[in-house]
Image (tube, grey):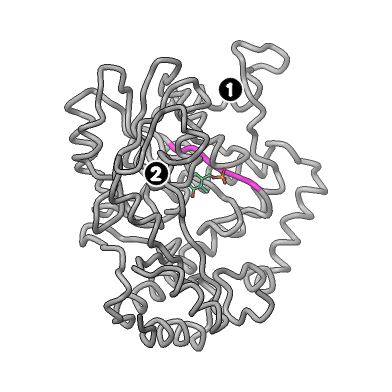
């Protein structure tokens, strides 16, 4: 797409705006050679825990590792089942599979497109250990509904917050609601590293200590390995960059919310269906996804007009080849399947310019079937 005028996301604008600060932070790490873990990674952990409003944040090398460590800390292993939504990025399910347990896919609600507590309830078996809810696209899932279900059956609730840094459910930050919260700092997430990064948040000291040991080759004391561990440490360079970005996260979030609300109010074309945002939630608009009946036609229309759109995500987890062995089939999760077949992601990022926002809105409104 050579003649793209409006990109779905453009990270170069943030780098241009804060280059001096980022480069200064990187230089500090180089000067101290604090490259793996170390004081800059530790400082970011403290700042991020304070931001989320929990006692502990355990920085890791990416969001997928965060999910894996969360499952291990919660005692998930072979023979166990964990319920996850069918419409999520596949890494939510990987965290479960890495432990030898089985992800069981629940459908989403038809309006919020978030995990449906009633569908999750149907998936509970004697082997179920917990539920991972995903705050998909930056919209908090129904934490009340999911936690009630979990209480009824003695299950844990973990949160996949990879798309929802700063989002709130009934005034409380995501990542502080369930037993453990999992974040990603992949470039393009609401808070992002210059490379890969992630964090696991919790209030429970035992979970935190265990995850800290696991990410550090299974040792508390160097060269004494108490259990089989992993090399999942956060890099010092990423910690230093993230400490800079975290200062800007509140203003980025505000911008995302302003743009998201403009789209919601000003895109009035009935051919485009928006995600519902219940009043007890504060979404952070990681992705602005709409449903369009004739998706290919709409995608071609936007591309011709020079607007880059994507699909998040074209195949639900239960129909991915990698999970074919679980026997998932079409019709198992109809709402998630409908979303996969009709979703289009519009451009939305904090540095979007007014004329770009207006152009996206105008194009959406003048689309005709
Ligand atoms: C990005 C993402 C992840 C994985 O994070 P990585 O840092 O890319 O490993 C997990 N879950 C969701 C919902 C995501 O969007």
User: Viewed as shown, does residue 176 lie left or right of 225?
Assistant: left
Q: Answer whether residue 200 is magenta in the image.
A: yes
Alpha carbon distance from label 1 to label 2:
21 Å
Q: Which residue is mark 1?
A: 213
Mark 1 CB near ligand 1 (8 Å cut): no
The residue shown at (20%, 24%) is 153
| Label 1 environment density (alpha carbons within 10 Å; few <14, some 14–19, many ≥20) | many
User: In this orientation, which residue lies closer to the viewer: 295 or 102?
Assistant: 295
Residue 345 locus on image (x, y percent): 45, 66
Q: Is residue 62 magenta?
A: no
The residue at the point 35 percent across, 56 percent down is 339
The numbered dot on residue 193 is none
Q: With respect to residue 193, does 65 lie above or below?
A: above
Compare residues 326 and 77 and report the one nearer the observer: 326
187 displayed left or right of 27? left
Q: Is residue 32 left or right of residue 196?
A: right
Does the CB distance between marks 1 and 2 fall below 8 Å? Answer: no
Seen at 45% across and 35% down, the residue is 93
Q: Secondary structure at mark 1?
A: helix
Which quadrant would residue 176 be assigned to in this image?
top left
Per the picture, the main secondary structure of the magenta-coloured stretch is strand
Label 2 CB-ligand 1 distance < 8 A:
no
Q: Is residue 183 above or below residue 14?
A: above
Among the 4 quarters of the image, the one containing residue 77: top left
Which residue is labeled 2 in the image? 175
Identify the magenta region.
196-201
Direction from residue 235 to residue 43 in the image, left or right: left
**Sequence-first tag of 1 and 2:** 2
> Which quadrant does the C terminus fall into?
bottom left
Looking at the picture, how far across and down is residue 1, in whole percent?
A: 65, 74
Closest to the observer, 189 or 321 = 321
Helix, strand or loop for disc 2: loop
């Amino acid at each position: 797409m050579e003649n793209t005028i409006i990109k779905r996301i453009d990270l170069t604008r943030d780098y241009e705006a804060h280059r001096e600060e980022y480069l200064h932070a990187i230089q500090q790490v180089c000067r101290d050679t604090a490259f793996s873990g170390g004081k800059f990674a530790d400082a970011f952990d403290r700042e991020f825990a304070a931001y989320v409003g929990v006692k502990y944040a355990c920085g890791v090398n990416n969001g997928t590792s965060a999910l894996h460590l969360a499952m291990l800390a919660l005692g998930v292993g072979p023979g166990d089942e964990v319920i996850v939504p069918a419409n999520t990025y596949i890494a939510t399910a990987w965290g479960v599979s890495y432990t030898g347990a089985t992800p069981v896919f629940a459908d989403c609600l038809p309006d919020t497109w978030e995990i449906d507590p009633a569908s999750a309830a149907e998936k509970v078996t004697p082997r179920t250990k917990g539920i991972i809810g995903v705050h998909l696209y930056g919209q908090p899932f129904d934490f009340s509904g999911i936690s009630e279900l979990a209480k009824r059956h003695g299950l844990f609730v973990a949160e996949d917050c990879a798309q929802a840094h700063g989002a709130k459910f009934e005034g409380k930050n995501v990542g502080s609601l369930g037993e453990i919260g999992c974040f990603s700092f992949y470039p393009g997430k609401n808070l992002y590293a210059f490379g890969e990064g992630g964090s696991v948040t919790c209030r429970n000291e035992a979970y935190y200590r265990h995850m800290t040991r696991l990410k550090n080759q299974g040792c508390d004391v160097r060269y004494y390995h108490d259990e089989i561990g992993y090399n999942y440490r956060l890099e010092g360079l990423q910690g230093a960059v993230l400490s800079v970005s975290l200062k800007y996260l509140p203003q980025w979030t505000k911008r995302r919310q302003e743009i998201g609300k403009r789209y919601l109010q000003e895109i009035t074309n009935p051919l485009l269906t928006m995600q519902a945002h219940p009043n007890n939630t504060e979404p952070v608009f990681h992705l602005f996804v709409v449903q369009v009946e004739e998706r290919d036609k709409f995608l071609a229309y936007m591309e011709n007009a020079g607007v880059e759109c994507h699909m998040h995500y074209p195949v639900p987890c239960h129909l991915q080849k990698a999970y074919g062995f679980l026997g998932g089939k079409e019709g198992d999760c109809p709402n998630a399947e409908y979303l996969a077949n009709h979703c289009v992601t519009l451009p939305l990022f904090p540095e979007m310019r007014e004329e770009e926002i207006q152009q996206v809105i105008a194009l959406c409104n003048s689309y005709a079937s």
